[in-house]
Image (cartoon, helix red, strand yellow):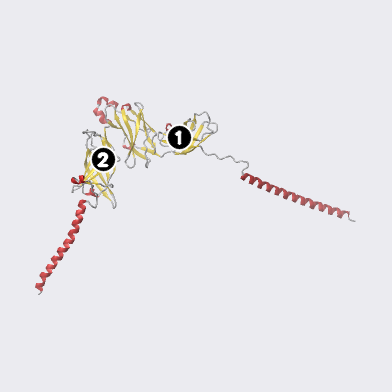
Amino acid sequence: MESLRRPKQCEHFWYYFFINGLLLIVPVTIVCLLISHGNWLRTVSPDPSLRKGEPTVVDPYAEVLYFEPASGPFAGRTNMTIVLSYHPMMRLAHATVTVAGRGCSQQAVSKRRGLVSGVTTITCTVAPWTRGDGDDQPVGPVRVTFDTPVGTKLTVTSSAKTFQFVEDAAAATDRNRTTAEHVPTLRYGSTQRFQGIASGGNAIPVRGQHLSRLTNVTVHVNQSDGTPRRAGCVVLDDAHMVCRSPAVHGPGPTLSFDVLAVDSETGCALNLSPTPDARIYFLYPDPVLVDFETFGDRPAVAINGRDLYRGYGIDDVHVRFRDHGGHCNVTSLATDRIVCRSTWLGGLAGLRDIVVSVGVTFERDVTRRSVPPPRSLFNLEVVIVAVTGSFVFLCTVSLLIIACRSRTNEQFEYSRMDRSATSAP
């Protein structure tokens, strides 16, 4: 009997084994299909034209956080460092990098993923730039494309910041040795300081050599988020030019900057920036103007405030009178006061407000400091004090008179009594 029951037990064993296997394989297969198609990790573009070829992933959280440098030579060989926000598709995908439309051969990719988010860092070498067809320009965004094994693409593009191919002074010398001794250069030293206020517009004097050959000179200040802010420069002569500080709204006080220009004789783009250790831009807050005051018949005007001498020079400050259009020449600057000398001959007694501008973008209206009115003789407080004082004075005098009168009466009574006693027999 026992030998007859064993086959039945084996049949039940294989039956339960088959059922449990199905229960295990089916969920695993479904999960693998979902992960491979990216239904949990991405959103496929609903455009039917994209689905016919290679689906493109649209994800607002995948972005280029930072890349450096912002420019490189036309000859290529620039080592790029690109930092992207982490995306799950980057884990198994192959990255293809283009910089301003040119390839960037990949060197290394490192991924650092946290519990909630992470970053992906890519280092690559930029290929040389050669002019292509149409309006191909040596400037453009950094674009990273991730190709997954199932044919899905994730493209991440830097929208705010661009990379520009330039030709430095050494390359320009090699291309045009006949004018090598006249290559434009800037002189950076302890007296050359790139600085400005948050609103921008103040002048930055720059010295150099052979600057008259430069055109399209711009200053690029890189904000803390990597977005550059640009401002133009005007060449005065072969050794001097004046740049304007751009408007920069962000944390400081020190940022990096670049000076880019075009050589008018060779047509080459030049990067005139200093070495990285000297590429420091000093950012200061806008000045705070409180009020102003005058000094009787003197033609001087003093403007009070805070942060009044940081990030700009005395030539950037202009003061004018709104009432009659006169001007006031600035004679001194301090951290809390601006002093100017009026050119108006009509006097400053009736001056109510003035206009103070720093550079070409910052301008504020400043009102006269309020002076308390003189106390009137018929002020209520004065009347109360006078009446109270008079009352106290009268009471005191009355008490003195009463005391003196009582003393006199007592003396008179004593004298009368003495006389009566003397005349008695």
Q: Residue at x 75, y 51 (%)?
A: 402
Q: Mark 2 falls on what kind of element? A: strand
Q: Is residue 182 visible?
A: yes
Q: Residue at 15% of width from left, 65% of height from top?
A: 16
Say whether residue 351 is left or right of residue 70.
right
Q: Measure the C-alpha gap from mark 1 to mark 2.
A: 43 Å
Q: What amino acid is at disc 2?
A: Val
Whether 190 is drawn above or below 17: the answer is above
Residue 201 occupies quadrant: top left
> Which quadrant, please, contains the C terminus?
bottom right
Badge 1 or badge 2: first in the primary sequence: 2
* 383 and 285: which is toward the camera: 383
Numbered tag placed on residue 370 in the rendering:
none
Determine which quarter of the picture holds residue 96: top left
In the rendered image, residue 140, in percent from the top left (x then y), is placed at 26, 37
Locate residue 72, reporting x and y percent: 26, 36
Is 66 situated above or below 325? Answer: below
In the displayed structure, 122 sits above or below 418; it is: above
Q: Label 2, on which residue?
A: 142
Residue on which disc 1 sits: 356
Q: Residue furthest top?
A: 178
Instruction: Give the answer, above or below, for where 93 lies relative to 263.
Output: below
Look at label 1 and name its amino acid. Val
Find numbered disc 1 in the image and state the secondary structure of the residue it sits on: strand
Nearest to the observer: residue 85 or residue 211: 85
Crowding at dot 2, Cα within 10 Å, few <14 / some 14-19 / many 20+, comes out as many
